[in-house]
Image (cartoon, coloured by chain):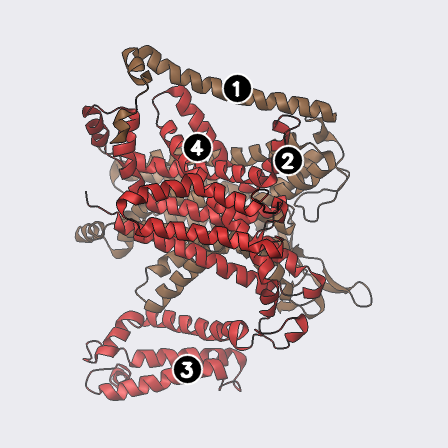
Chain colours: A red, B brown
Amino acid sequence: MIKNLTFLKPNKESLNLYISLGAVFFVLGIADISFNVFGFLPIWISYFVPLAFCFLGLHLIRIEFSGNKTLDVLNKNINSDWFNAILTIFAIFLLIKFIPPILDWLFFEATFVGSKKEDCTSDGACWVFINVWFERLMYGLYPIKEIWRINAAFIGLILTVGLAFFASAKTKKYVLMFLIFVYPFIMISLISGGNFGLEWVETNAWGGLALTFIISIFALTFCFPVGLFLALGRRSSYPVIRYASIGFIEFWRGVPLITVLFMASVMFPMFLPEDTYMDKLVRVIIAITLFESAYMAEVVRGGLQALPRGQYDAGKSLGMGYWRMHLLIIMPQALKLVIPGIANTFLALVKDTPLILVVGLLELIGMIDMAKTNPKWLGFAAEGYVFAGFVFWIVCYAMSRYSISLERKYKTDR
Amino acid sequence: MKIKNFNLGLGSFLRNNPKLGDFLPQAVTLFAIIFIIGFFTFNAQTNMDSRGIDFGFGFLSQESSFDIQFSLIDYDGSHSYAKAYLVGLLNTLLVSAVGIFFATLLGVIVGISRLSSNYLISRLAEIYVEIFRNIPLLLQIFFWYFAALRALPLPKEAISFFDVSFLTIKGFFIPKLIWTNFSILFYSFVAAIVSIVFIYVYGKRKQEATGQRIPVFLISVGLLIILPVVASLLGGVSLDFGIPELVQQSETIFNFKGGINIIPELMALALALSLYTATFIAECVRAGIMGVSKGQKEAAASIGLTPGQVLQLVVMPQALRIIIPPTTNQYLNLTKNSSLAAAIAYPDLVLVFAGTAMMQTGRAIEIVSITMLTYLSLSIAISIFMNWYNKKIAIKEK
């Protein structure tokens, strides 16, 4: 009995026979997934035929130390035992079932050219929707003839950042200072206008992806220093400062951002003197800054705690005061340790900006919400969300990759 | 360095008077905090006076006069605002619990898959994590609600699961469980769990004292099955199913009656929350398993433990110590993120209370504070528990 079964146990002697036999079974199984050759069988059996075929095929080619390099690598990575074989079949099944329809919808059956809804006749996605609304999605309700101002502001930003990258160490300092302390004001006055002969554009008209970036950039710039001070405050030896910082951090970390935004839109105006008016965008940026700085503080605190006591002692023994010691010795090391955490906080901030939708500011996702309810363009929600998802994904993925490269660059052994 | 010259004379003055040096910064901070709070309170007072609003929580007992689409407890417009708050809170807790359950399930599977030796599986898991982690949650909720679930069929052509559950554009209709004498079953379960705790403690003490082990696990499973079954047979517990049926409401409108309807808002929200949070939980699980050093497993194997015992007694306790704190943090995040429900009109705490109730009463300060305090107390309760747990499981070094 067992002797008869040995032909099922692949061996090295008749390698080619087993490989070809296994490959045939495997291909047959895969082909059956898409063409359902055995459809005439009862449904429960026909479901399992491709599985069984693939399994048998993988079993036949599972030959250890076969001498064939490709086969060995294959076996090691996807076919090391029967359990892995089943997982592999499962993964291939998923890929075959889902990838082609998705690709069809995205590219092969999609419509790319046209100017109105009726141009989309195929089954796939209607990218015409994105094409037509592109300017709105990027710039919101900003007046079309003034759009060059937003472009100029962002191109200037990119150029300055690029300059900061490639400048020599000496000029770099000044470029960075310019970037942090001067450029934001240039950017705001360029976009909002009202002076230098530029037409005033209300913040209500700002929107789209540009608004996402504006809010992110400002909140990032502000939340970092606030977070640093809060982290230092939480580790301070003065009880009043310590408990004030703890209370502040735990409060903002304990509430959802959406309630913070509600607070910014309905409670802030009540807390200000009667006849003062603060722009909604400013209130929202303040709210997001306070919220994220609490998270930033906790990240920085993690870095401060990870530093050995010896670093503090060494700083003090050199006669340094509190601020000089932190600026020159503690912070550079602590921040280096928590680069991934800082990057995660920044990422969370960018991903949180769409929430400003609830207080009526329309950035990218808000604009898509508006476009998809336009009577002329009903029924293109999926295209809009896929596009926005793609944009956000690129931004966030690039940020996380950049943080990994930074982490590697500043990694030092201790 | 430039910083060397940065000296206003204040520093040396304070260093010469250490008592004052301790006192001054704290006094300044305290004064600033009191000033800011006082300033805000004063402004709020004058603003409310000029608008003719007075501060108070009396409105909570007034009749709410709005309906809520989905409620776990008995509620309609004639109930009070306090009850509406409770409905919202329960809905928030419901979607959080469902989300946490599925996120944990998926997160553990994906986290382990990422460490799999199978190239295809680990790559698929990685792609899933990288895609879903880097897209804003709000966008995912919108996608599932406005794009994916809107493509579901009308009730007449519902996708049926074994003819007892139906997936339609109006929600997922599942059978309702109708128990008779449910309390008997419930109490027998409670009794079983209590006795299991006692047996566990007794077994542990006995093992520590004498080295003998009693099969706690087998006894527990036995108790958990036998006690409720015996109680049900004696107490006459029985179970009926209320299966949803298609009902014609008018010429063209069909809908399902009977059973439980899981509304599409709840489905979209739970789906998006679990898919999003699962990516973070997967990373926690992966970090935890990778954090147990190989030497631990080898040492355990070398003293003769079986692979099962190695996993149970050596690897898991250490991995869980790394996994549990960040995972709890993710649970907390999920609960807070469930407030995004307001964007797709799932009646959670934010939509019901900070939305509808605030529009009706106009009491911005009271309502936003109550909402924030609710979430705050939830998070503080969980972080207190986490601190206690961290202290308990921390490695006690000598």
Q: Which residue is at 59% across, 35% downward?
A: A263
Q: Does dot 4 land on a helix, a strand or a loop?
A: helix
**Is residue A10 depicted above or below A231 in this figure?**
below
Q: Nearer the viewer, mark 1 or mark 4?
A: 1
Give me the C-alpha separation between circle 3 and circle 4: 55 Å
The answer to whether marks 3 and 4 mark residues whose Cβ atoms lie closer than 8 Å is no
The answer to whether marks 4 and 2 mark residues whose Cβ atoms lie closer than 8 Å is no
Mark 2: few, some, or many residues within 10 Å (few <14, many ≥20)?
A: some
Question: Pointer 2: what residue?
Answer: A266
Name the amino acid type tagged 2.
Val
Name the one closer to the observer, B195 or A393.
A393
Q: Does dot 2 land on a helix, a strand or a loop?
A: helix
For disc 4, the chain is B
Question: Pointer 3: what residue?
Answer: A29
The mark found on residue B35 in the picture is 1
Q: Position of residue A107 (x, y in %)?
A: 52, 74
Question: Pointer 4: what residue?
Answer: B384
Question: Where, by quadrant of the figure, is residue B256 drawn?
Answer: bottom right
The answer to whether marks 1 and 2 mark residues whose Cβ atoms lie closer than 8 Å is no
Give me the C-alpha separation between circle 4 and circle 2: 31 Å
Name the one closer to the observer, B192 or A156.
A156
The mark found on residue A282 in the picture is none
Q: Position of residue B377 (x, y in %)?
A: 52, 33
Q: Position of residue B42 (x, y in %)?
A: 62, 20
The answer to whether any part of residue A102 appears in the image is: yes
Of mark 1 and mark 4, the one earlier in the sequence is 1
**Is residue A284 depicted above or below A91 in this figure?**
above
Give me the C-alpha separation between circle 2 and circle 3: 62 Å
Give me the C-alpha separation between circle 3 and circle 1: 76 Å
Quadrant position of the C terminus of chain B in the picture: top left
For disc 2, the chain is A
